[in-house]
Image (cartoon, rainbow, N blue to C red):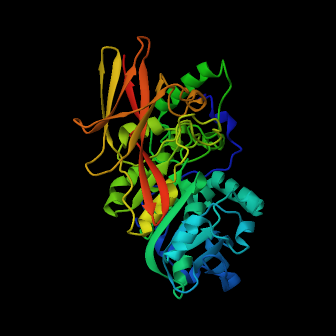
Amino acid sequence: MKLLIIAMFALFFVGLAPQVQVHPAGEESYGGNALFDMQEIRNESSLDVEVIEDWHKVEGEVPTRQKFITICVGELWPGQDYRIPVRMIVPAGSKAKGFHLTGGHMPRQLENDVDLKPIEKELIAGGVGLVYTVVQDLAPMGQKELGDQMYRRFINTLNPRYSVQYWGWPASIMRSVTAAYAEDDFFEQGKVAVSGGSKNGASPSVAIICDERITALHASVSPIYDSPLRLCDLTAWDELEKDNRVYVQAEAVNHFFLGGTFGPIYNAAALEAGHSWEDIRQLALQMADYIFISRNIGKLEERDVDLLFQPGTHDMVAYDVPWGGEHFPQIPVYLRANSGHGQRKGHPAAEKDQKNLAAFLLGHFFNDMEPMLKPPSVDYEVKEGKLNIRVRFKSGSKEESGRIWWMYDRHPDGSAAYLAELFPDDQWKDMEYNSMDKAWTAEIELSEDVLHIDFFSNHKKTQQRASTIYPTYISSPYTRVWLK
């Protein structure tokens, strides 16, 4: 199989699912163990806590108590532990009820007492704790040799226990929850919100699927959907190869994330190790229930978790936004035009005042804020060379504005051109509110040679807590209209 992209990626460190049946957490596999043994994940006695700096008071505008430790996430293989640092922060005069957890740190950052950011001050002042850990590649953490060992074992066995991406990082998030709640003199049970971008959006996505202690997720530029490319569907890959072959004749733009199941493409390494494409496809299918929000959205809604995703319109990791908009329009997303990893140009009409994360966290933990906007519905009509679009919110949503962007004949999800060709600077407009239809409306001119048109709209709602204003935005489902 001659795929244009995969030959570039054998050297990139990434996890791969095993050639055994796997199931969502709690069901048996791997000879009796799920990918995540949730009983062991919650086992405080196996944390093997090493106290680097015990609880102590930290003065400041909002004083705190902080503790710095390392914990054992689990045993990778007999005699080899996987350990991470964790810093815990609680109010100076009371227990924290629940906490906000992030992994977007480096070990050296966590060695020193944390100087709180404005949103962290609000959380602490309101009685919510903070838990910081490290979700990073092993080499920058001073564990390159262990990372190399894990990679070799993974390639030889196709066992996700040796994958930092599929097992190590999500397990780190969940074990950090256990470590915090083990400090019962400083934390009491409450809501747990996780957030982050890239690997720190992907890992919490797995964690919230598997760990019911987690109640909210804000993730950016990270996978969401179980689209055909991610599941190694050969038809989708053939389309990708065909488009890239044409496109790279003019401009050699490619990226080692485009087409990957849950990060950098591992296909070449698996093929070189003697596995077949069908093996790779089956492994992606077997892992899907663990890693994709789209596969679990019903269960997450039943748990009443709060979700918000910011995948970007041109991201190398979240490269299947068009597919997601079509198949899972109910998943809440905010799309900043021309955004994603490495996209520095942006769009001149993109929002510059967005404060979604802060409002999301405050709204999750406290009851004194308006609810954020939910995804609206979209309908459209092609008539007399024009596309007429209507975007509707539920009554009482209190959205304040609408702005729409569009692009003609965008290339397929995950292709080089999908990443490189941006929404043109002049293809946007402010929408008008039609009080009769109770909808935000826009009209777009269509030329005869257009095959399809993509569009999405963003809508503002201003949140407020005390005297602080938080402009927030939600997007309509990304929509592709075929004209021929």
Q: Residue at 69% x, 57% y: name it.
A: 137
User: Which quarter of the rendering shows the C terminus?
Assistant: top left
Quarter of the rendering containing residue 116: bottom right
Expressed as whole percent of the image width and height from the top left, the position of residue 122 reads 53, 70
Expressed as whole percent of the image width and height from the top left, the position of residue 262 reads 55, 48
- Does 62 appear above or below 244? below
User: Which quarter of the rendering shows the N terminus?
Assistant: top right
Expressed as whole percent of the image width and height from the top left, the position of residue 439 reads 29, 37
Q: Residue at 57% x, 34% y: name it.
A: 347
| Count of marks placed on residues | 0
Quarter of the rendering containing residue 64: bottom right
- Does 25 appear above or below 318? below
Is residue 325 among the parts visible in the rendering? yes
Q: Nearer the viewer, residue 280 or 140?
A: 140
Q: Which residue extends farthest left?
A: 436
Is residue 33 among the parts visible in the rendering? no
Quarter of the rendering containing residue 372: bottom left
Q: Which residue extends farthest top?
A: 448
Q: Residue at 64% x, 35% y: name it.
A: 345
Expressed as whole percent of the image width and height from the top left, the position of residue 51 reads 69, 83
Q: Residue at 53% x, 83% y: name it.
A: 182
Q: Nearer the viewer, residue 17 or 59?
A: 59
